[in-house]
Image: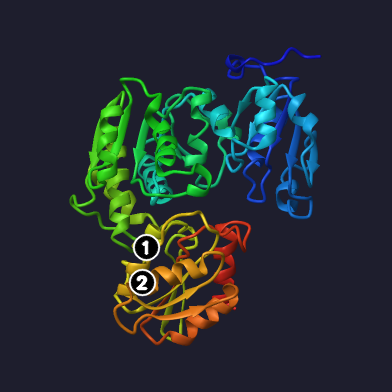
Amino acid sequence: MNARLLPQDISQPGALRGKRVTVMGLGRFGGGVGVTRWLCRAGVKVTVSDKADAAEMKDSIRQLEGLPVTLHLGGHKEEDFLQADLLVVNPAVAKNSPLVVAAEAAGVPRTSEMNLFLQRCPAPVAGVTGSVGKSTTTAMLGAILAGRFTTHVGGNIGRSLLEDLPCIAHDHVVVLEMSSFQLEDLPLVGISPHMAVVTNIQPNHLDRHGTVEAYAAAKKNIFRYQSPKDVLILNAADIALAAWKAEAIGRVEFFDPSDEPFALGVIGSHNQNNAQAAWVAARQFGIDRDLAAAALRKFAGLPHRLQFVAERDGVIYYNDSKCTTPQGAIVAMAAFEPRRVIIIVGGYDKDVSFEALGAALAERAKAVVSLGATREKIIEALEANRRQAAPAVERAEDLASATALARKHARPGDVILLSPACASYDMFTNYRHRGQAFMDMVNN
């Protein structure tokens, strides 16, 4: 039997070759594909374990064709966890999962795709997190830095950079979007990005973290292991972040959303916040404002983030499926005139409050179509804040009926906005699946 890996061995070159590694969670979203491919090519004996069956995982499985990987799908086998040399856990898997706990008790070391990358990345890393705006800020920062550096963008924004490691040099720059789930595992390796950007902090993912304090603690890992030479960038307008400065080890810089605005190619005042965060981060790499401004003018936005879909009979459709928080939906509505938005909201329940969203819907929406597991919670919050007849309220059983109901209320000059304020897992594989379904309904 091979000698079991020690946690400090995982980062050593060649330490994983020939070892038995179980990847827990391939994911219908492909979250475990990148690390599985990388492990196979590193000479590792890889077993992938997932509760979903092969039919549900067909797209992810297709990406592993030709690789020497053992797939155990449709349920987990205890021996895959207790007899492994290393467990690589998908960020979507809760750390109190019984098999994760059992493996830890058996002395099996645990890591994650993000940790494996951070341990090996030769380039400086800029990490971006926050409750709202982290994807767009990441993409904006990547676009600005690409004007001067070879830049690699990945992480929670949609792709693993592990397979790109051979192409990443010490004089390149890496920009990573980092979710609370990914940041939760950084204490296992004691590494934080050289530059950490926090766009804002609001209650989110309480179904996973339990409390706002635990959620914030996970976010703080983005700077917890920095050195005195590193940089933490915080939002000057976010009161909740003010106290974080005292906990920083490195230098702290602030971005002010009300600073001189940039000319942007994307709509919404919130994108000025994202642009200011990206600009202050880029400035740490010696980028001047003119170069940043030029990159931001060309920035066309990201799919599923206030994405223009079409204009039909004078009604404009926007896909904001990436919006999975109440605050995100509030921000999206603010990009349009009051009482001109028919908004589709609702989805998976993350145990967050909809009180602020209810107030915003009551004040700004022309009509609200609610669906999914949170349908009644959102309507209840809206009704508690209603002071007049508007907005109209509709209950939908699925996205198709929601889109049809939204059309019923729309007139030329109105906007139909899919900005769910919730995750998609109750009805869809992920937010991309939901957003694409909406766009297909609009365009067909």
Q: 175 or 1, which lies in front?
A: 1
Which residue corresponds to the image point at 74% horizontal and 49% vertical from the top-left? 52
Mark 1 Cα-neighbour bin, 10 Å: few <14, some 14–19, many ≥20: some
Does 272 sit left or right of 444 as displayed?
left
Q: Secondary structure at mark 2?
A: helix
Residue kind at label 1, given as amino acid type: Glu
Front residue of this view, candidates 401 and 315: 401
* x and y, in percent, of residue 387 in the image: 29, 78
Q: Mark 1 touching mark 2, by CB under 8 A?
A: yes
Real-space Cα separation, disc 1 to disc 2, in angstroms: 8 Å
Q: Quadrant of the C terminus?
A: bottom right
The part of the image, by quadrant, that contains residue 393 is bottom left
Residue 222 at what x, y percent from top left?
Answer: 41, 33
Give the residue pinned by disc 1: 355
Quadrant position of residue 334: bottom left
Q: Which residue is mark 2?
A: 384
Q: Residue at x 44, y 30 (%)?
A: 172
428 lies left or right of 388: right
Residue 37 visible in this rendered orientation of the protein: no
Q: How many residues crowd mark 2 within 10 Å: few (<14), some (14–19), many (20+)?
A: few
When asked about the image quadrant of residue 142, the answer is: top left
At horizontal 48% and vertical 44% (from top left) the residue drawn is 210
Regarding residue 32, the answer to whether it shows in the image is yes
Q: Relative to 6, is 390 above or below?
A: below
Among numbered discs 1 and 2, the one appearing first in the sequence: 1
| Residue 6: percent from left, percent from top | 63, 15
* Element under disc 1: helix
Amino acid bearing label 2 = Ala
